[in-house]
């Protein structure tokens, strides 16, 4: 089942070259747009999403059927699914982005030199963003909206499973752009399931300034191996919740249950549980009871199995695994340093949390865990750009260069130096 390009020319190379040229032209126009125009485009797109709820659900059902035929598991189908509530959340996300201050043309720093020169570091759009993602239709709205807000054009390559939904969402964004007097080419969605389009994007160094992947390990590895365009990587979320010996039992139970089971298929879901040996006999049965009652399979080391017989034996692979399902691994450890070492070794540098009333232990954990997001006494499921006040996110960057953590509109800008003089020449 492959959807052919809706463009007259089915040649993927020609298609992508044409999209790249149009995106580059649109990026120049969007970079000069007033913030009021950008906000109007997003507000009108939000209205369009609400008005077309029935049509969006109809297109999404085609994608769900395609996903079922491909044999997608329940977690992946949940990621793919749109309903009225999720469409409303997309619309609210667009409106929230409107409330964010314009991240472009901000003077980030300013200083004077002894020779009278005045220097400024000013935020500017990156240019053209290439977004490659899987399964989640809402990424179409989030990514496009953040790019519009930050003055960037975007080429979106949605996963084959969500192509119909993504095209319908992109059409709402085009509607908003046109009403705001902005080029609809600022948001383009690759209209084919052909994987050759991804390969083309990875070589378009003169048209795309940065590639952002959002998907599974196979997608990320391909982009790491093949891309000639700079990338902002969104790696898997093997997130940990560490129950310190000074944790409150009820707080730990409630946070863990939310962190694991609120939505098991998102990258911020806790996949591994670490419990201090000193508190394990008391707290682990409480935690396991809550998890098992909610339908979660618990796999653990020998020490945890001795405490609770409902825990299945974990393999070495479990410590590395992002399940994206109702499964969690548990390990008994001997204090915060071992917990930190375990997370830094097995984790994916995404999001990790400590539950404790000991502020000293919390400070050590937050300082030494090498992850994009570290948390104290809260659920890892708050690892989300919307929850950070960014309106939405284009992904969670687990790298260390340019952007780290939720990538919102501000993180989609770069900067240039502006130098003001009054006739100075260098001796």
Image (spheres, rainbow, N blue to C red):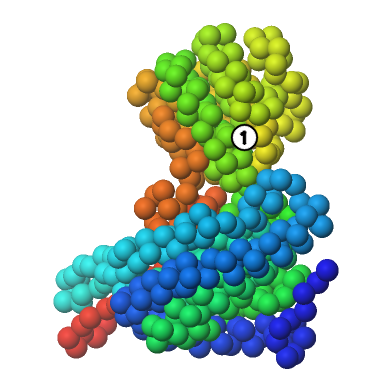
Name the foreground residue: 52 vs 103.
52
**Residue 305 percent across, percent down from the top left:** 70, 14
Does residue 66 appear in this view?
yes
Apparent side of residue 34 relative to residue 209 in the rendered image (left or right): left
Does residue 229 appear in this view?
no
Label 1 SS: strand
**Residue 240 percent across, percent down from the top left:** 56, 33
Q: Quadrant of the C terminus?
A: bottom left
Name the foreground residue: 97 vs 290.
290
> Residue at horizontal 55%, vertical 77%?
171
Name the foreground residue: 427 vs 12.
12
Of all residues, the one furthest to the front in this rendering is 54
Apparent side of residue 17 relative to residue 420 in the rendered image (left or right): right
The residue wearing badge 1 is 271
**Residue 208 percent across, percent down from the top left:** 58, 76
In the depicted structure, whether residue 345 falls above or below residue 5? above
Name the foreground residue: 145 vs 237.
145
Apparent side of residue 356 relative to residue 218 in the rendered image (left or right): left
Q: Residues within 10 Å of mark 1 (few under 14, many from 20)?
A: many
Residue 347: image quadrant is: top right
> Residue at horizontal 47%, vertical 35%?
379
Q: Quadrant of the N terminus?
A: bottom right
> Residue at horizontal 44%, vertical 19%?
250
């Amino acid at each position: 089942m492959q959807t052919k390009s809706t463009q007259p020319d089915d040649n993927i190379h020609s298609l992508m070259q044409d999209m790249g040229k149009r995106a580059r032209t649109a990026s120049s126009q969007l970079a000069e747009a007033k913030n009021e125009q950008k906000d109007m485009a997003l507000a009108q797109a939000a209205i369009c999403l609400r008005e077309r709820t029935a049509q969006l659900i109809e297109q999404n059902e085609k994608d769900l059927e395609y996903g079922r035929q491909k044999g997608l598991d329940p977690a992946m189908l949940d990621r793919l699914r749109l309903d009225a509530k999720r469409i409303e959340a997309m619309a609210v996300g667009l409106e929230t982005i409107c409330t964010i201050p314009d991240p472009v043309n901000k003077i980030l720093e300013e200083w004077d030199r002894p020779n009278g020169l005045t220097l400024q570091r000013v935020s500017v759009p990156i240019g053209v963003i290439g977004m490659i993602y899987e399964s989640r239709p809402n990424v179409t709205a989030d990514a496009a909206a953040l790019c519009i807000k930050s003055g960037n054009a975007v080429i979106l390559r949605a996963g084959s499973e969500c192509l119909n939904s993504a095209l319908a969402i992109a059409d709402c964004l085009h509607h908003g752009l046109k009403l705001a007097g902005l080029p609809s080419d600022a948001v383009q969605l690759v209209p084919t399931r052909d994987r050759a389009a991804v390969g083309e994007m990875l070589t378009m160094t003169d048209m795309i300034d940065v590639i952002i992947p959002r998907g599974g390990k196979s997608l990320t590895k391909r982009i790491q191996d093949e891309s000639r365009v700079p990338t902002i990587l969104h790696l898997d979320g093997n997130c940990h919740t560490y129950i310190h010996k000074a944790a409150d039992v009820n707080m730990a139970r409630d946070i863990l249950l939310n962190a694991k089971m609120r939505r098991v298929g998102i990258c911020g879901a806790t996949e591994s549980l670490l419990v201090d040996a000193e508190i394990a006999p008391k707290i682990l049965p409480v935690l396991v009871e809550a998890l098992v009652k909610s339908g979660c399979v618990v796999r653990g080391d020998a020490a945890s199995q001795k405490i609770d017989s409902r825990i299945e034996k974990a393999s070495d692979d479990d410590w590395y695994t992002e399940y994206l399902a109702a499964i969690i691994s548990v390990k008994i450890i001997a204090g915060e340093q071992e917990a930190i070492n375990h997370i830094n070794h097995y984790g994916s540098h995404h999001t990790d949390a400590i539950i404790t009333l000991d502020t000293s232990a919390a400070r050590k954990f937050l300082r030494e865990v090498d992850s994009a997001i570290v948390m104290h006494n809260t659920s890892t499921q708050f690892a989300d750009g919307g929850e950070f006040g960014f309106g939405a996110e284009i992904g969670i960057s687990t790298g260390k260069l340019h952007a780290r953590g939720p990538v919102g509109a501000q993180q989609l800008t770069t900067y240039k130096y502006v130098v003001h003089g009054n006739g100075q020449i260098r001796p």
